[in-house]
Image (spheres, rainbow, N blue to C red):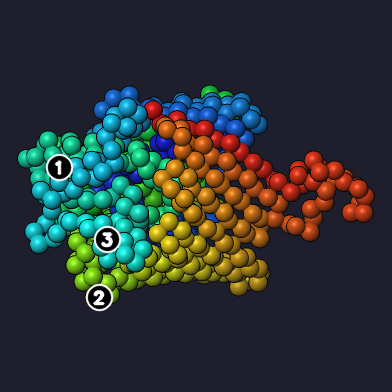
């Protein structure tokens, strides 16, 4: 139909950021870091979308596809608290980036834990050896120290400062891989919420209508407590064969462990996921917070202590009553946070005999690479996949991925003011079958037919964030 836009998924991530929910601490996101670099999606056809904040906590989205088929979609999102809004262009031009950063620093210094310095010398240890700064690695998480509940003005100014800075790095906040936001900053008050939401539970509702398909999709997210969340999603299709499918998920997310319970009407499915993090998780979070938010001395101390490794294990069990089938998977992951991010994961499905090994390495502050090897012990089939991501600046990101089954794929994202332009190309994976022109291999060929055989698909996507 058309490529799904990024506006609503971006707002959902912003909602989880504001409510202090760690999306990466779950078995469903166990391999998300490498997947976003290797298995990224590219646009299909030509589509245009526009997302706009209508009011406090209310946003709308309109999508229109012109090629290959004409289709449209309209959706609305409502949340219990204000989410990200793109400030007017004039206000961004009048407020330099240095002013925004200084405002965030002053607010953070007023609410920072005692004993932690917030000064950031220009020529500090991290900049001197080209280590990534916190803003390089965790977009939107700088100085994530919640303000005291009585300081409403500080909270509002802090949120405005974050919105202004996020609008400058809007593209990297949307498109950059999971290696950009893999850390829950471990300040002592990271799970504390402001007074505006402490008396009521945070929620979010999303609905999307597709007239050409006569279908409606929707989701309801409710945080029952700071460490538990209920998500209900559904798809309703009208017409000659009406259908309604629902999925309910209850998740518990704590620093040391997390769990997910899932019920689905499709196939009458029930499943459970669990993850456990070994080691002193609190000390690791404090070390990451001191490195990215502290002074030069704090960074030196963290690097000397070398408390940066995180080891986690997880499992998944599911059973479908409709066809009496089930499955199980086991996973192990080692993650090294500082100074450059790296991750090694291993996932095993004993019933299917499938083994997956993935490795991801941040080579430079704005460049990373990933590789994955899949092997089946029953069929002896295997596949190698690789991918890279390069963030040229705040307005340009390039991704490239290759695998034996999908071939070569490239994605280029560029931002112009409030618009994000995406160009995706997919090339045929079987190079031996590529011929320039019809007929036998020895027949002459034209360049146009050769391009058709070389390029499997391409797509253009225009997104406006209003």
Where is residue 234 shown, x and y percent of the image? 43, 37
453 on left or right of 371: right
Q: Are marks 3 and 1 in contact (CB under 8 Å)?
A: no
Q: Earlier in the sequence, mark 2 or mark 3?
A: 3
Q: Which mark is residue 255?
A: none
- Identify the image quadrant of residue 299: bottom left
Q: Residue at x 79, y 55 (%)?
A: 433
- Which sits in the foreground, 147 or 312? 147
Q: Are marks 1 and 2 in contact (CB under 8 Å)?
A: no
Mark 1, residue position = 194
- Identify the image quadrant of residue 185: bottom left
Where is residue 345 shown, x and y percent of the image? 45, 68
Q: Earlier in the sequence, mark 3 or mark 1?
A: 3
Mark 2, residue position = 304
Q: Earlier in the sequence, mark 1 or mark 2?
A: 1
Mark 3, residue position = 123
SS class, disc 2: helix
């Amino acid at each position: 139909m058309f490529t799904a836009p990024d506006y609503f998924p971006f707002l959902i991530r912003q909602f989880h950021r504001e409510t202090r929910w760690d999306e990466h601490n779950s078995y469903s996101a166990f391999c998300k870091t490498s997947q976003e670099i290797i298995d990224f999606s590219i646009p299909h056809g030509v589509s245009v979308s526009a997302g706009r904040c209508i009011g406090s906590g209310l946003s709308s989205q309109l999508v229109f596809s012109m090629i290959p088929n004409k289709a449209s979609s309209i959706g609305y999102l409502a949340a219990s608290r204000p989410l990200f809004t793109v400030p007017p262009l004039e206000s961004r031009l009048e407020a330099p980036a240095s002013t925004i950063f200084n405002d965030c620093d002053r607010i953070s210094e007023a609410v920072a834990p005692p004993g932690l310095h917030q000064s950031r010398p220009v020529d500090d240890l991290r900049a001197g050896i080209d280590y990534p700064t916190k803003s390089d690695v965790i977009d939107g998480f700088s100085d994530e120290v919640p303000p005291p509940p009585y300081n409403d003005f500080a909270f509002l100014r802090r949120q405005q400062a974050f919105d202004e800075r996020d609008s400058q790095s809007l593209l990297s906040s949307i498109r950059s891989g999971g290696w950009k936001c893999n850390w829950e900053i471990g300040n002592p008050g990271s799970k504390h919420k402001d007074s505006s939401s402490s008396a009521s539970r945070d929620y979010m509702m999303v609905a999307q209508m597709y007239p050409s398909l006569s279908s409606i999709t929707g989701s309801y997210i409710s945080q029952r407590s700071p460490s538990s969340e209920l998500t209900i999603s559904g798809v309703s299709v009208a017409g000659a064969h009406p259908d309604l499918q629902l999925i309910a998920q209850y998740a518990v997310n704590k620093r040391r462990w997390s769990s997910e319970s899932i019920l689905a009407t499709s196939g009458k499915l029930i499943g459970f996921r669990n993850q456990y993090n070994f080691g002193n998780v609190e000390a690791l979070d404090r070390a990451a917070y001191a490195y990215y938010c502290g002074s030069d001395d704090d960074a030196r101390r963290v690097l000397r202590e070398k408390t940066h490794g995180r080891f986690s294990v997880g499992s998944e069990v599911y059973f479908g009553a409709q066809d009496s089938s089930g499955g199980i998977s086991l996973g192990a992951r080692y993650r090294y946070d500082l100074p450059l991010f790296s991750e090694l994961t291993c996932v095993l499905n004993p019933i299917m005999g499938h083994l997956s090994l993935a490795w991801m390495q941040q080579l430079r502050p704005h460049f990373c690479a990933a590789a994955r090897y899949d092997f089946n012990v029953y069929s002896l089939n295997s596949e190698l996949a690789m991918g890279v991501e390069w963030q040229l600046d705040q307005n340009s990101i390039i991704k490239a991925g290759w695998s034996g089954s999908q071939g070569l794929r490239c994605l280029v994202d560029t931002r112009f003011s409030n618009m994000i332009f995406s160009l995706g190309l997919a090339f045929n994976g079987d190079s031996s079958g590529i011929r320039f022109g019809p007929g036998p291999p020895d027949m002459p060929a034209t360049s146009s037919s050769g391009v058709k055989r070389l390029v499997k698909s391409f797509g253009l996507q225009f997104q406006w964030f209003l």
